[in-house]
Image (cartoon, rainbow, N blue to C red):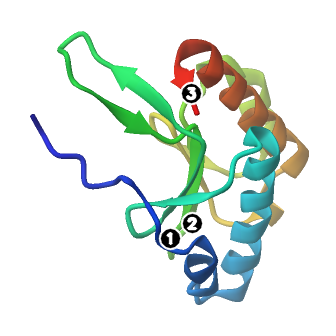
Amino acid sequence: MAYVKTRKNDASVTAYLKSIEDKRRRADAKKVAAMMRKATGATPRMWGSSIVGYGSYHYRYESGREGEWMLTGFCARKQSLVLYIMSGFRAFTALMKRLGEHKTGKSCLYIKSLDDVDTKILQTIIDRSVKLMRKRYETE
């Protein structure tokens, strides 16, 4: 079975946030951290060396592969903040149109700055994604 190297660990979230060199990106990361904590009620944990995750869920594919992943989380990269919206974006089409400047991947939301988006809409997306994940999976 394949080994998943991005796993929950005991590294310091505070140290990670302090290590973000760009002041604006660090401030945005702290705001996103608060938004995710509000949505999940969970204590943040590091996943790998650069992802801050909140809560977790257990998944199992038809192939038999299974594992644990975060309900939501984020990573502060040089180019943008990456928010992990694990439910995907299909249920949020109208909200995504009103969010502001962003890009998406399958479950990744890329934002250059929180100044570029409506943070109330962002909070709603995070909240609803967490609720959807809790309906779909056994969660912590």
Question: Is residue 94 placed above or below 51 in the rendered structure?
Answer: above
Q: Which mark is residue 130?
A: none
Where disc 2 sits, the SS reads loop
Residue 82 shows in the view = no
Q: Position of residue 102 (x, y in %)?
A: 64, 50
Looking at the image, which residue is at 63% across and 14% down?
A: 135
Identify the amino acid type marked 3.
Thr
Identify the mark nearer the N-term, 2 or 3: 2
Crowd tier of the residue under label 2, counting other residues whose Cα lies within 10 Å: few below 14, some 14–19, many 20 or above: some
| CB under 8 Å between discs 2 and 3 | no
Identify the amino acid type marked 2.
Ser
Where disc 3 sits, the SS reads strand
Question: Is residue 67 placed above or below 77 in the rendered structure?
Answer: above
Quarter occupied by residue 112: bottom right
Quarter occupied by residue 17: bottom right
Q: Position of residue 115 (x, y in %)?
A: 82, 65
- Residue positioned most to the top: 62
User: Marks 1/3: CA distance?
Assistant: 27 Å
Looking at the image, which residue is at 60% across and 19% down?
A: 90
Crowd tier of the residue under label 3, counting other residues whose Cα lies within 10 Å: few below 14, some 14–19, many 20 or above: some
Identify the mark nearer the N-term, 1 or 3: 1
Side (left or right) of 123 relative to 18: right
User: Marks 2/1: CA distance?
Assistant: 5 Å
| CB under 8 Å between discs 2 and 1 | yes
Which residue lies under the disc numbered 2? 80
User: Marks 2/3: CA distance?
Assistant: 28 Å
Which residue lies under the disc numbered 3? 139
Which residue lies under the disc numbered 1? 77
